[in-house]
Image (tube, coloured by chain):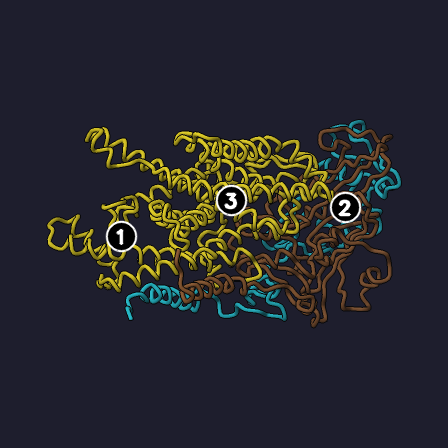
Amino acid sequence: MKWHVLRPLWLAIGLVVVILIARQFMVPEDFGVHGDSFTYNFYRLSNVQEWKDFPVKHQGRESCVECHEENVTTLNASPHAPIECENCHGPSVGHPDDVELLPIERAREHCLRCHASLDYPNHARSELPNVRDRTHKRRRECVTCHYPHDPREKPE
Amino acid sequence: MSCSRRDFLKQACGGTLASVLPVSAFTFLSPEEARAAVENANVRWAFLVDTRKCVGCGLCVKACKNENEIPYDAPVTRTWVERYVITNDGQAHIDSPMGGRDGFIDNVINGEEIDPDNIAKAFFVPKLCNQCDNPPCVQVCPVGATYQTDDGVVLVDRDWCIGCGYCIMACPYGVRFFHPVHKVADKCNFCYHRITKGMNPACVESCAFDARRIANLRDPDDPVTKIITTERVAVLKDEYGTKPHVFYIGLDENVR
Amino acid sequence: MTSEAVVHGVEWTVKELFVYPNEFIYWSIQIVMYPYMTGLVAGAFVLSSLYHVFGQKDLKEIAQFSLVFSLALLPVAALPLLLHLQQPLRAMEPLLTPHFTSAISAFGIVFTAYALIVISEIWFVYRRYFVDQVHELKGKEGFANMLRLNVYRALTMGSFDISEEALRVDHKAAKILAGVGIPVACFLHGYAGFIFGSVKANALWMSPLMPVIFIMSAVVSGIALCMLTYIVIMEWKAFRKRRTEGVTAAIEIKGAETDIINTATKYLLGFLVAAISLEILDLIFRGYTAMKSWDILRSVMYGKDFINIFVLQYTLGNLVPFVLLLLPGRTLKRTVVALLLVLFGVFMMRWNVVIGGQAFSLSFSGYMHYHIPIIPHSVETFKEGLFGALTVIVTPFVLFWMINKFVPSLERGEEAKY
């Protein structure tokens, strides 16, 4: 029997062994099937907690009311009540400790998101007060005449 | 060519073995397996979109980008709003500029100004990852970097994804993309970091019109679950067998 | 060259009408190159095996060449993937945590298995040559000779037995490997077809015929490339001999042999007919059943991509070479032209599948146009641009030149030492 014929086989086996050893070092311990399905539940378990720990940015109105009670009360009583504070002021994470002032969205385009008239038939949008951008006070900021926290009022 | 029977058998066996081994490594999907993946948990997240209420303000898209650190000016987004304007001639004009990030403030669609008198119907359709029960994106990931949690959300492991893009090609809904900074696959995950703390996803929170709502299908007292189970709802592209979990009220036949 | 926060695909995708916001041409030129290169690998190997397994004596010389050339092509098959991956440093993961439900996970294992088979087969075929070289270089002086001596020593893997029986065993082993390697080579390329054919989300790719079409056209391209390279090299050698030593010496050095070309051409045409038949069958079925996607597919295939598909691929890449190879009085020049057109046609097939499948939106209501980056201005536009593709094309020839210095595959007749 000419044994030399098996040399490439030893090479192949050696390579497989190297890969298997490498797996021990390079694959995280908690990688495997975590659930009933290899198709859908094959993953690194600790990643789930990593996503749970992703930093939350928007804090919600309850966190604003602590210091801005007057504005929140005004807002809650106005037609703009359903609008979140952070829709116009951006995410409040870090405020006020690290971020002293949150931005105030004054751009015309911001209000036009809801209030630009598109004239769609039978549409919820048409039930909102709306204006034609091209003809209503062009280039003027809406907040010049309309107070965002209570749009029925004029700003001070 | 002369070939002894022994030679032939040896070759045939070797050939069959070589071809069978790789094939046997393929796992084929069984219905039990797919169902079992999320059966045992007491939470199964689902989403309800009411297209009758959406006005296309796009604040959900803006909130999502800020909450999930998707670069604001990048043309990719975890959620988006599509506008459909069906004119009297039956043609559908559809657009979603920057995913609806800046809302829709005029009637210029794909470079064409639509005359409002010509509009038969128009509506907005918010879209996001459907967190399917049979997610084809998970099936095709070569390394197990994307997966489904036991509460039904499909997540991507940023430290393991090799960036091949197969999952992006496999999603029939087009919800996946390459994150421009992290250079791995990314998609909506129902704000997993928020819902697991009892908060709402950023898009749900920011919607002033109640067009977006999240639900736990395993909780019979969840008001949104009640709507999904008792009222008439639809899903997108169910012909692909993905079993999506974003349900729509008011879904029109023109919706792609 | 910076790697800014640029969305992958935005620089070479132009959208028309309604396309979902996250849709871009993510699988671009490198994903066209990848099945093309693995196809060449598979085809070259099959051609070599036609001699080793099925004893097609006419193919002996080209068989040796195509075996070694398929080894040179092999690392190049992995190169487009490395250039495409957004995280190339994680390229080993399909070997570490293969998710076998994904066709791409097969890559690590099949590629490794195939590499081992080719390397082993070459070892068995050339072992005697390695041993002879060791003996020849033993006494010689000089650093280069010492280097060569050690390389050959390593290549023998310590087995110096070149008795009749040992060589017979080598020959038998090579034959077995050549046989076993055929299904593996087919799998190496068939799974690439499966990668596309199993994507239900893509209306153009989704088809059970896709793996078969890919294999057929892969074999076509492999045979064509081997024939072409063989002809070019042999004619160049003959030309050089004629110039340096005159016509009489050149009579002993023949150029590309007619018998070899004829037999190889027969196989080429067979696979070519199979490939084109399947593609046309697929097209007919789509048109006949007219599923939801048919409207947009038709507008892409008969409109925007008409030239790419029907003129470049079907006519120039299939019909014209078919005619050129079958017309009587086939000259070497005509064969070369036909082979070049075949290679071009197979490339266009890959292009039309990969890029064509992304030419329409998932919404079926819009289009995406691919503008391949020509002049790179960033790492990404190099990797996924024209120069990245050219790098991939050039590398196998460079590798072959290097490998051929130790594993000579172009000598024949009395010169051949195996």
Residue lying at 44% horizontally and 50% vertically, measured from the top left: C46
Determine whether, in the image, residue C16 is placed left or right of residue C179: right
Task: Name the residue at 72% across, 46% down.
Answer: B59
Q: Measured along the vertical axis of the image, is residue C201 above or below residue A120?
A: below
Residue behind mark 2: B125
Query: Chain in cyan?
Result: A
Pointer 3 residue: C271
Q: How far is the residue under mark 1 from the one under mark 2?
A: 70 Å
Q: Position of residue C58 (x, y in %)?
A: 37, 45
Q: Secondary structure at mark 2?
A: strand
Query: In the rendered image of this protein, which colour is used for chain B?
Result: brown
Q: Quadrant of residue C10?
A: top right
* Cα distance in 3D space between marks 1 and 3: 30 Å
Mark sitting on residue C159: none
Q: Amino acid at mark 1?
A: Tyr
Q: Which residue is mark 1?
A: C418
Q: Amino acid at mark 2?
A: Val
Q: x%, y% of residue A58?
A: 67, 54
N-terminal-most mark, 1 or 3: 3
Q: Which chain is yellow?
A: C
